[in-house]
Structures are given as structure tokens and as C-alpha cells.
Image: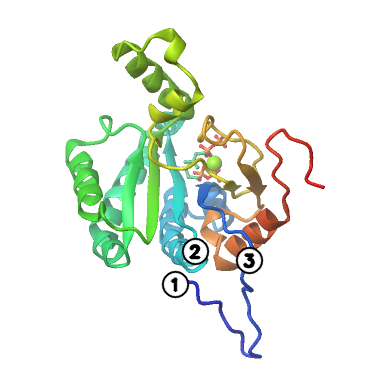
């Protein structure tokens, strides 16, 4: 699965190596509902298709040499959806763990979770914890799953813990806040991809993504494939990251 550029039938490289590979990519996996609607299917069928798709995107991420992937699977606001859809999303998460964990582990994926676990059914919480524990030493790909995640909730949690730890006001700085976030041990995302054409951040990594390059594709998440990921990486390579400074001469 490592960095082997694909060869087309003509012997040309389909995915020529890129100069810069983002160290951390965030994906807002959006458009499952519209994908289903376009096919006359229930929204949950779209979520299932989106979950199937995850496998190929993970494989592609490893092939392109992306070390950290954070996927937005369920937001704090998504609890407000009809309960049937929420239940379906919870059971999809459970099924993914049941069916895919062994293979993810064998492929060297380190699973992590950001967000809250307490609102999940106790059995599912335990499965998530066990999956994290099992894969904790894997290093091929860190797969950070944002489930019951919201960037604002993350900041509120950080502020509460900073206060609870009795940190003096003058010691509170950006570096300290970052250490109190769910992503404390991870670098900030370099690239955030959103599928389905929506041009908003929807409460995803609002602190960490301050200087992430933002890439939006109209493709709906279940249709987002290796070619699409490569296109996002090509576009990332065209971007000039300035971080508020003047352009390089
Ligand atoms: C993304 O797809 C998955 C979740 C938010 C859980 P949506 O369910 O938001 O799909 P659309 O945006 O309605 O098409
Ligand atoms: C963002 O998508 C959350 C996830 C992809 C999990 P939403 O579909 O919930 O976001 P909005 O409602 O379009 O902003
Ligand atoms: Mg959506």
C-alpha cells in the first residue's frame, strides 16, 4: 500500500508523485443524503454508501503518503436529525468497528477519536475505546474520527479544563490552548476537503484549521474516490501558503 504511483495501461503514471504531501488532511464527508435522494433511496442508504467509500479513500490516503487523516463523521449538531437517522449513523459506526477493525489494524491504521463519547450507547463507547487501544501503536496512518464532534464544544471543554487546572491567566497562550484540544498530539490540518459543494466549515476543526487550505468539490461523498483525492492534492500543491506574510519572491 505504500507510495507506489499507479501505472496506466500505456505505462504512464496516473498519479505522478507530488512535491508536497499534506501531513494532516481533514475531510468533511458531506452529501450522503443527496446521493441517496438522487437514487430514490432513503438517506441511510447514502450513509452506508459513504461508509463503504471510506475504505477506498483510506487506501488512497496511505498510497499517497498522507500520515494523518481526520474525518468528520458526526457533528454535535447532527443529534438534531430525525432519531431514525441518528440511530442509523450510530449503528453504522458500530458495524464499521465490528467488520473493519481487524483489517484496519492489519494495515497499520491507528484509530483515534475526537469529540464526546458519553452520549453514545455504553456498548459502542466500549467498542470505540477497545479499537483505539488495539491500534494505538500503529503508525502507517493515523485515522482520527470526529464523531459527536464540534469545534465550539472542543473549545468549551478546553477552557473548562484550563480553569479546572488552575492555569494562571498570563500563562494562557495559543500553544497552551492547542495542548488542551482533542488534537493535542497532532499537527494542525494542512488541507481540509469538503465534498458536496458546500462552502462552509460546519464547526469542524475551527481552531486547528485557522490556516488550512480549503478545497471544495461538488462530488458527493459516496462518489469521492482516489482520483478525486489526487485532484485535491494537486490543487494543494498549487496553493501558496502565506500565513499572513508577504508572498515569497
Ligand atoms: C454527511 O452527509 C454525513 C453526515 C452529516 C452524518 P449528509 O447526511 O449531511 O448529506 P446531505 O448533506 O444531506 O446530502
Ligand atoms: C457536516 O455536515 C458534518 C459532517 C459531515 C459529519 P452537515 O451536513 O451536518 O453540515 P451542514 O448542516 O450542511 O452545515
Ligand atoms: Mg450535509
Q: Which residue is mark 3?
A: 18
Horizontal side of 33 relative to 130 (left or right) equals right
| Residue 201 in view, yes or no | yes
What is the crowding at mark 1: few (fewer than 14 residues within 10 Å), some, or many (at least 20)? few
Distance, label 3 to label 2, CA atoms, is 10 Å
What is the crowding at mark 3: few (fewer than 14 residues within 10 Å), some, or many (at least 20)? few
Please, which residue is most extreme toward the right here? 249
Q: Which residue is mark 2?
A: 65
In terms of sequence position, does the residue under pointer 3 or pointer 2 come before the other?
A: 3
Q: Secondary structure at mark 2?
A: loop
Q: Position of residue 103 (x, y in %)?
A: 28, 66
Horizontal side of 127 relative to 109 (left or right) equals left
Q: Is residue 145 above or below residue 140?
A: above
Q: Position of residue 149 (x, y in %)?
A: 41, 34
Q: Position of residue 245 (x, y in %)?
A: 73, 35
Q: Position of residue 113 (x, y in %)?
A: 33, 42
Q: Residue at x 64, y 44 (%)?
A: 213
Horizontal side of 143 relative to 36 (left or right) equals left
Distance, label 1 to label 2, CA atoms, is 7 Å
Q: Are marks 1 and 3 in contact (CB under 8 Å)?
A: no
Horizontal side of 124 relative to 70 (left or right) equals left
Q: Are marks 1 and 2 in contact (CB under 8 Å)?
A: yes
Q: Is residue 234 above or below residue 120?
A: below
Q: Residue at x 41, y 26 (%)?
A: 154
In terms of sequence position, does the residue under pointer 1 or pointer 2 come before the other?
A: 1
Amino acid at each position: 500500500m505504500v507510495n507506489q504511483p499507479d501505472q496506466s495501461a500505456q505505462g504512464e503514471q496516473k498519479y505522478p508523485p507530488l512535491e508536497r504531501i499534506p501531513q494532516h488532511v481533514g475531510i468533511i464527508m458531506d452529501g450522503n443524503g443527496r446521493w441517496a435522494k438522487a437514487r430514490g433511496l432513503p438517506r441511510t442508504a447514502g450513509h452506508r454508501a459513504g461508509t463503504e467509500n471510506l475504505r477506498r479513500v483510506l487506501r488512497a490516503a496511505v498510497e499517497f503518503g498522507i500520515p494523518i487523516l481526520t474525518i468528520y463523521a458526526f457533528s454535535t449538531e447532527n443529534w438534531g436529525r430525525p432519531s431514525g437517522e441518528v440511530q442509523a449513523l450510530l449503528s453504522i459506526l458500530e458495524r464499521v468497528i465490528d467488520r473493519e477493525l481487524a483489517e484496519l489494524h492489519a494495515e497499520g491504521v491507528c484509530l483515534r477519536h475526537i469529540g464526546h463519547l458519553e452520549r453514545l450507547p455504553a456498548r459502542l463507547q466500549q467498542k470505540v475505546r477497545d479499537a483505539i487501544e488495539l491500534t494505538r501503536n500503529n503508525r502507517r496512518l493515523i485515522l482520527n474520527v470526529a464523531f459527536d464532534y464540534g469545534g465550539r464544544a472542543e473549545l468549551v471543554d478546553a477552557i473548562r479544563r484550563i480553569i479546572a487546572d488552575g492555569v494562571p491567566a498570563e500563562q494562557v497562550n495559543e500553544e497552551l490552548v492547542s495542548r488542551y484540544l482533542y488534537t493535542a498530539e497532532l499537527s494542525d490540518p494542512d488541507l481540509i476537503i469538503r465534498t458536496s459543494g458546500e462552502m462552509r466549515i460546519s464547526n469542524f476543526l475551527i481552531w486547528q484549521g485557522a490556516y488550512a487550505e480549503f478545497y471544495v468539490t461538488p462530488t458527493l461523498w459516496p462518489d469521492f474516490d482516489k482520483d478525486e483525492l489526487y485532484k485535491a492534492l494537486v490543487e494543494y500543491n498549487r496553493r501558496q501558503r502565506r500565513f499572513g506574510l508577504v508572498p515569497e519572491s
